[in-house]
């Protein structure tokens, strides 16, 4: 029995997956996109920053501006010998396409490109403009990727009306979940100072563990906010705590605690920082606290883009999608600064970043069709 021919989206997905673009490397992925988009009338601009390659490609000059956003970089493979097939040799087994980037997110990028090919072929004089914002710095520090492109666009007065990010958002079946926002991420490194001494002479020392324990307990118990229609309450979590010299008879002179807020639009970074300092100060601690704001929360309420995407999903798959703001940070946080409607949608995410990452082949072309239908709903 002959093997069924691969669809154009499937073939392009495999071509991109075969390029080992481990963050922050692009390894030719964006050049391949330029070769496909230029003949469709896209003006393609490569924006480089500290070794990171970014692509801004735009067709048209009118509003509204619809942007497909994504990343060509992937996370490291982990032990290659643990993969059932080579991570950068796309392989189909039992109805699934295996390889690093299959779900996160080279199939989404391939689906976007083919969707645009089909849409512009059927609607050469569509409304508005279509653009691509592609980076190779999403899985890394995210300091020289999408944020740089957004700054460049803002400087020259280019606006974006709708942005669809191809992150893998589906939970169980294609289309069951789309992301209309993400929580912010605020990290802190707390150092509580004490006085080191012999454990048999506690009166001559000051134990930072004992002193900090009550404050930490209060931080754990604090109700930071109540969330809102789209977000669960803000969460404060300790990830690492360390004190001691390793000896059993020494009171430590320092305790360090690493923690993180995943916070909703019901709170602000400044407000959370102030409340943490107030609790620590109330307990009279001798401490230092260094903050890192990894990303602000963003939220797109129900509107034109989410409605157009939800209708496309229903028409293509029959699935009634749900809005969600769960998960980690994404580049949507940067795009939301210059675009009022940012939505993320892509394939199931159960295998992302794992050994044997994959996407079910049966989802590849429906994903492309959903992207095309979304364009039709907004720009046809």
Image: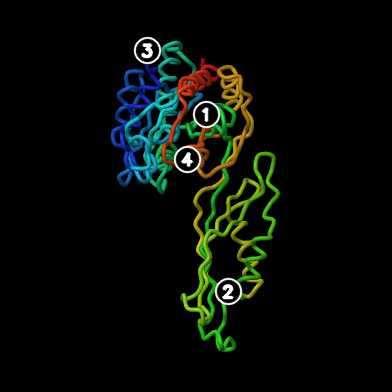
Q: Nearer the viewer, mark 2 or mark 1?
A: 2
Instruction: Tell me if residue 111 comes above or below residue 294 in the rendering.
Output: above
Query: Which mark is on residue 162?
Result: 1
Q: CA distance from mark 4 to mark 1?
A: 14 Å
Q: Which residue is mark 2?
A: 209
Q: Are marks 4 and 2 in contact (CB under 8 Å)?
A: no
Q: CA distance from mark 2 to mark 1?
A: 50 Å
Q: CA distance from mark 4 to mark 2?
A: 38 Å
Label 3 sits on a secondary structure element that is loop
Task: Name the spot of residue 73 as percent of width and height, x first.
Answer: 37, 39
The mark that comes first in sequence, 2 or 1, is: 1
Label 1 sits on a secondary structure element that is strand
Query: Which mark is on residue 250?
Result: none
Task: Name the spot of residue 259 as percent of width and height, x first.
Answer: 55, 59
Residue at the front extreme, as displayed:
1
Tell me where residue 31 sits by quadrant: top left
Q: Nearer the viewer, mark 4 or mark 1?
A: 4
Taking the image as shown, residue 368 lies to the left or right of residue 19, namely right
Q: Are marks 2 and 3 in contact (CB under 8 Å)?
A: no
Q: Which residue is mark 4?
A: 331
Query: Which mark is on residue 1?
Result: 3
Q: Are marks 4 and 3 in contact (CB under 8 Å)?
A: no
The mark that comes first in sequence, 1 or 3, is: 3
């Amino acid at each position: 029995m002959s093997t069924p021919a691969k669809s154009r989206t499937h073939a392009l997905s495999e071509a991109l997956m075969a390029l080992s673009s481990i963050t922050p490397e692009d390894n030719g992925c964006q050049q391949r996109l330029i070769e496909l988009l230029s003949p469709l009338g896209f003006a393609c601009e490569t924006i480089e920053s500290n070794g990171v390659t970014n692509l801004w490609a735009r067709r048209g000059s009118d509003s509204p501006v619809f942007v497909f956003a994504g990343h060509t970089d992937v996370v490291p493979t982990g032990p290659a010998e643990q993969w059932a097939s080579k991570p950068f040799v796309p392989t189909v087994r039992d109805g699934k396409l295996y390889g690093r980037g299959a779900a996160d997110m080279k199939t989404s990028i391939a689906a976007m490109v083919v969707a645009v090919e089909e849409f512009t072929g059927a609607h050469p004089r569509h409304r508005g403009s279509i653009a691509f914002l592609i980076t190779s710095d999403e899985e890394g520090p995210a300091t020289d990727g999408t944020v740089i492109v957004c700054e460049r666009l803002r400087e020259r007065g280019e606006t974006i009306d709708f942005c669809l990010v191809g992150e893998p958002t589906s939970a169980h079946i294609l289309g069951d979940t789309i992301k209309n926002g993400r929580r912010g991420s605020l990290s802190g490194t707390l150092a509580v100072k004490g006085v080191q001494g012999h454990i048999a002479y506690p009166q001559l020392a000051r134990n930072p563990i004992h002193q900090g324990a009550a404050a930490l307990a209060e931080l754990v118990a604090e109700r930071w906010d109540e969330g809102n229609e789209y977000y669960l309450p803000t969460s404060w979590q300790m990830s690492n705590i360390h004190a001691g010299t390793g000896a059993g008879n020494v009171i430590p002179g320092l305790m360090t605690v690493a923690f993180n807020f995943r916070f909703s639009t019901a709170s602000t970074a400044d407000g959370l920082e102030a409340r943490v300092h107030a609790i620590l100060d109330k307990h009279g601690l001798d401490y230092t606290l260094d903050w890192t704001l990894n990303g602000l929360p963003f939220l797109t309420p129900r509107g034109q883009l989410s409605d157009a995407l939800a209708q496309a999903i229903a028409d293509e798959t029959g699935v009634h999608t749900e809005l969600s703001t769960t998960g980690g940070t994404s580049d949507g946080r940067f795009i939301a600064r210059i675009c009022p409607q940012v939505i993320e949608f892509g394939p199931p995410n159960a295998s992302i970043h794992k050994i044997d990452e994959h996407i079910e082949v049966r989802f590849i072309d429906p994903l492309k069709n959903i992207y095309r239908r979304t364009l039709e709903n907004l720009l046809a």
